[in-house]
């Protein structure tokens, strides 16, 4: 599977990245996620294939989540902070959990 993906970050939460299908755009994400992201900043547009390696995520998992739910939410741990996920609303902590 190959997909053109847009990667966004937010100023609200350091280390939070949103991967979406570029063709569907930000309008396709749930309103709760849109509220969390605020005014997202585009980091990159890229062609994502299973062979391409990502630094902080498994490419096949990213592609699978985008296909099934419309987005992939990546939360990277801040080196200075152990409780980075505590600041996220509970409804967002399970977005990438298996069904």
Image (cartoon, rainbow, N blue to C red):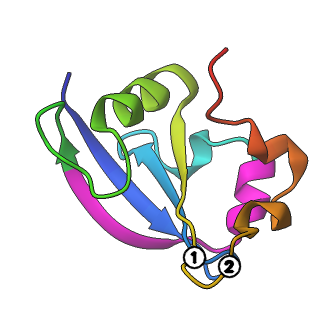
The structure residue drawn at horizontal position 45% and vertical position 32%, both measured from the top left corner, is: 66
Image-based side of 67 in relation to 60, left or right? right
For the C terminus, the image quarter is top right
The residue that mark 1 highlights is 78
Q: Is residue 37 above or below residue 59?
A: below
| Image coords of residue 42 (percent x, y) | 41, 71
Q: Residue furthest right?
A: 90
- Is residue 41 located in the magenta-colored stretch of the structure? yes
Give residue 68's mark.
Answer: none
Q: Magenta segment range?
A: 32-46
The structure residue drawn at horizontal position 53% and vertical position 32%, both measured from the top left corner, is: 70
The structure residue drawn at horizontal position 76% and vertical position 68%, both measured from the top left corner, is: 83
Give residue 81's mark.
Answer: 2
Q: Is residue 99 above or below residue 10?
A: above
Image-based side of 88 in relation to 65, left or right? right
Image-based side of 45 in relation to 90, left or right? left
| Image coords of residue 41 (percent x, y) | 49, 75
Q: Residue furthest left?
A: 51
Query: For residue 43, which quarter of the picture?
Result: bottom left
Q: Is residue 21 above or below residue 15?
A: above
């Amino acid at each position: 599977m190959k997909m053109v993906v847009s990667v966004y970050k937010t100023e609200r939460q350091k280390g939070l990245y949103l991967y979406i299908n570029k063709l569907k755009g930000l309008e396709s994400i749930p309103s709760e996620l849109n509220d969390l992201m605020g005014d997202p900043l585009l980091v990159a547009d890229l062609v994502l294939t299973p062979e391409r390696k990502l630094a902080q995520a498994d490419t096949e998992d990213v592609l699978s989540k985008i296909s099934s739910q419309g987005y992939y939410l990546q939360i990277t741990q801040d080196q200075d902070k152990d409780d980075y996920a505590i600041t996220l609303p509970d409804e967002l902590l399970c977005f990438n959990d298996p069904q």
